[in-house]
Image (spheres, rainbow, N blue to C red):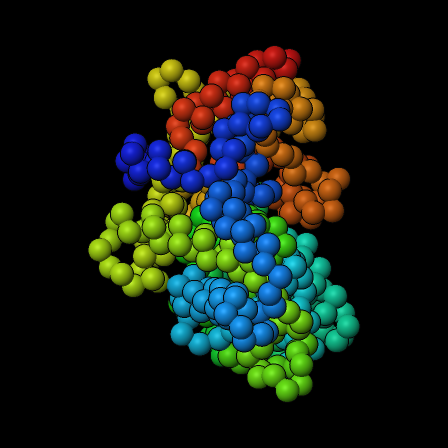
Amino acid sequence: MYKPVFSESLLNEIRSKFAYLNYDPTYGKRIFLDNAGGSLRLTESITDKVYWDLFPDCPLRYHKRALDINKIVTDSEKELLTTVFGASKGSIMTEISASSCFFKATRTIVDGVKGKNVVTSNVEHPSAYDSLKIAAERNNLEFRVVEVDKETGFINPQDVADLVDEDTVVVSIIAASNISGNIMDLKKINELIRKKKKDVYFISDAVQHMPHGLVDVVEEGLDFVNFALYKFFGNRGLGIGYCSERMSKLNHDKLIAKDDSEWMVGTPAPTLYLSTLKVIDYVCWIGSHFTESKDRRTLYSQGINKIAEQERALLYYALEGDKTVPGLRHIDNVTVHIDTEDLTNRDLIMAIEIGGISFEDVVEEYSKRGVTLFNRVNTSIYSKRIVEALGLTGAIRVSPLHCQNFDEIREFLIITKEIAEKFKK
């Protein structure tokens, strides 16, 4: 049994901070369960950005408004490094997308480090998998792929370590599956791979996991990790990455006169950094309800961990239901894929299937009833390798967020039961 940690008053306050939480101003009431595709937005993260966007000043000047804008960028980078990633050293990389960050990271490491092979898994997002494969092929390196456990959805840390040797340049393992929500044991993977090669580079795609759980680059031994702001309650247009000190010493795109720690080429979009700060402030605000500490990393850690606990309670309710409505595990004609009894290593994502109707058509059936979600199928370049690695042809991905309540999950379950009964053969 997983119990919620947000009081009714706190949850109501949380809900008030999100834009269009349970309705679309054009299309009316709806339940938005496609947060893995692009999360609900913190209103302040967007509105404050718009306010600052109206000023024409360049952050590379030294008049008052320009200095204010520049401070937004520097404060954001500091907060990302220390508060979000838990690092005292390292650098922040930003690009137009998280995928762009990953392509830059893999290119930098594989082009700059001598070796004979790279290691990844078969459930990586294409931006991680493809970027590493392209870099490996360009450098004539062997591309080694560990297979996920089809039954559990987890990557076995020992299986990763078994593919590592003294000639391995980099290991790239996703932080959490964007199909099933399985959280990979990066700490254990790091421990085992460094027994095989102490200085191997270790990188991770955390786009799915970042809004739901804590990332600690020190504990997990990461040289690089990325996330997308638009999947973390903020704007599109900014991908963010942490880069270790040794990674920054590798040859990478930058102006020659700038320090090795610099990854930005050109002038940044400062208001996107402001949007990032608002998201960090929000998570710390949640944390302040559970600790008296004023330390930002402590506040952030508490906030994101309490988000994870709240979401685990929502996940349990969605799977089990209550006396008035059955959960997904108990609705006839509904299959929950990659399901595990222990939810402590799961983000708030469910991969389901309803018999008698295609994945595409069932998305439309939900839409007619005011529920927004999405399918991940093997006809999509973004999903084919991943769903097939899990032994599936596809799944309906249900991805709520911590700001949603049990009434909304209950309504989703009622609608799911109705659709399942309609198409039962």
Viewer-closest of 21 and 306: 21
Quarter placement of the N terminus: top left
**In the orientation shown, which residue stands out farthest toward the front?**
63
Q: Which residue is drawn at 62% across and 26% down?
A: 26
Residue 134 image-quadrant placement? bottom right
Q: Where is residue 416 in the image (x, y as percent from the top left)?
A: 54, 21
Q: Where is residue 368 in the image (x, y as percent from the top left)?
A: 63, 19
The reply to whether residue 339 is visible in this rendering is: no
Viewer-closest of 97 and 394: 97
Residue 15 image-quadrant placement? top left
Residue 12 image-quadrant placement? top left
* In this view, 247 is above or below 346: below
Quarter placement of the C terminus: top right
Q: Is residue 212 left or right of residue 247?
A: left
Q: Where is residue 277 in the image (x, y as percent from the top left)?
A: 46, 58
Q: Where is residue 76 in the image (x, y as percent from the top left)?
A: 48, 64
Q: Which residue is drawn at 43% across and 23% down?
A: 410
* In this view, 146 is above or below 424: below
The reply to whether residue 364 is visible in this rendering is: yes
**In the orientation shown, which residue stands out farthest toward the bottom?**
257
